[in-house]
Amino acid sequence: MRFAPLAFIAALFSTTAHAEAARYIVHFADTASARAARLPSRDVHARGDRGPRHVRSLATGGEVFDLPDGNPAHLAALSGVVSVEEDVWIQPTAVVDPLWRRQWNLHDARTGVDAEVAWRRTRGAGAVVAVLDTGITPHPEFDGQLLPGFDFVSDPDNARDGDGRDPDPVDAGDWKDVGDCGAKTPRRSTWHGTHVAGIVAARAGNHPGMVGLAPEAKLLPVRVMGRCGGRLSDIADAVVWASGGAVPGVPPVTRRADVINLSLGVGGACGMSFARAIDDARSRGTVVVAAAGNDAVSANAEMPANCPGVVTVAAVARDGGAAWYSNFGERITLAAPGGSLGDRGADDIVSSVDGGERGRERPAYRWLAGTSMAAPHVSALVALMRSVDPAIDVDAVTRQLVDNARPMAGPCPRGCGAGLMDAGATVDAVYEDRARS
């Protein structure tokens, strides 16, 4: 399995066999047990044995091991083991197909998020949104918008930039040739992170460009996915780092994010690694927003959408009802525009990308659809809320999102949480609450 960006691009959340050692994250009851497990792994590796090989330690205390024979029983037998979870690959969540008039998601009276009402109060100045994704490409929409980010993709082959973790979060392209990561057909680069970032904070006033919902917020670009998606261990560390926590071997973030956007996911229960990372982020005041997933199933089956404390976002189609592909159910906090994924590309969400089929070539725009596109609308709204009230806590953010959502303009029979996000009503409510305090 691999974590994928949650935008519809070919097969989403697919399980793929890799010609490599299986990788697992092990949590121990105490530091002594973890230390003892690390030391023998080096000796085993030196002997060329097929047993566990220690890779690194996580910021949340887990230990990452490679298993050449793929048998997790070797790890479960270690002293002091609390949990063993596969270090799964996580994939993006969008569908591939200017400009304000095309941005129905911001201004349509029935299905838009009422951006212009919110902008009477703020456009996001002072807030920071971390986009954990495929990276961000150079684009006029981001001139002056980017803070120093980081590339957490630890596998050089997956990173496609010639090294592992480094301070350069630029997207190197995630195109696939036949056979790459199990791909049966070739696929162009998605530029998924660039598209997500544009929805959040594309700057206003640059002709003939677009505008993000929080155009004066700053973006913290965090690259966590490459050509095969992203490792759970890399993404968990990135959540900790973006929220201001310490990660071994990585310099501290220059400015803690107010909100982390996770337009990515994989099927399965929320494991200890993600749960701990999200809990750490929330304890430092960072809101975590996740796409619900595009499998048209219960969001209970999608990680990190099903993790405790996450704001989970379903997708609304152009007609105002739930998008046919969107996950649903009791785990959904609220819904946001994600696009229809139908015959008309203009019914999807237009945002920034690169025009290259494989590597970077030129700034461009493209319509995509998916819960990947829905989630950054909510992340941008959180930025607007923090701009109006920097002290609003993570639980109050969720309450305001829920309390000020409005009824869907179309059907959502299987559960879209509180309904369609309303940027205008939510920002007004936060502003008024702060004025009264």
Image (cartoon, rainbow, N blue to C red):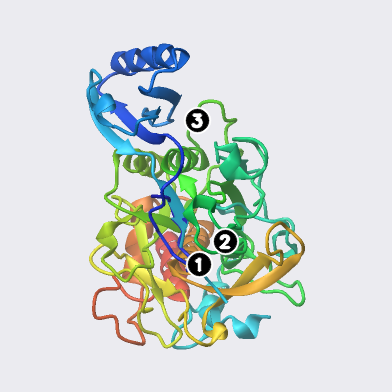
Q: Position of residue 316 (x, y in %)?
A: 40, 78
Tell me the number on the disc at residue 247: 3
On the image, numbered disc 2 is attached to which residue? 192
Mark 1 vs 2, N-terminal side: 1
Question: Taking 410 as reference, is 354 above or below it?
Answer: above
Quadrant of the rendered structure where residue 34 is? top left
Q: Amino acid at mark 3?
A: Val
Q: Secondary structure at mark 3?
A: loop
Say which of marks 1 and 2 sits in front. Answer: 1
**Mark 1 and mark 2: Cα distance apart in space:** 9 Å
126 or 215: which is nearer to us?
A: 215
Mark 1 vs 3, N-terminal side: 1
On the image, numbered disc 1 is attached to which residue? 9
Residue for point 32% across, 71% down: 296
Q: Amino acid at mark 1?
A: Ile
227 or 351: which is nearer to us?
A: 227
Tell whether label 2 touches label 1 (CB within 8 Å). yes
Mark 3 is surrounded, within 10 Å at the Cα level, by few (under 14), some (14 to 19) or many (20 or more) other residues, namely some
**Mark 1 and mark 3: Cα distance apart in space:** 31 Å
Say which of marks 1 and 3 sits in front. Answer: 1
The quadrant of the image that shows the C terminus is bottom left
Q: Position of residue 87 (x, y in %)?
A: 38, 39
For this view, does 291 lie left or right of residue 28?
A: right
Residue for point 24% across, 76% down: 414
Mark 3 vs 2, N-terminal side: 2
Q: Secondary structure at mark 1?
A: loop
Q: Secondary structure at mark 2?
A: helix
Q: Amino acid at mark 2?
A: His
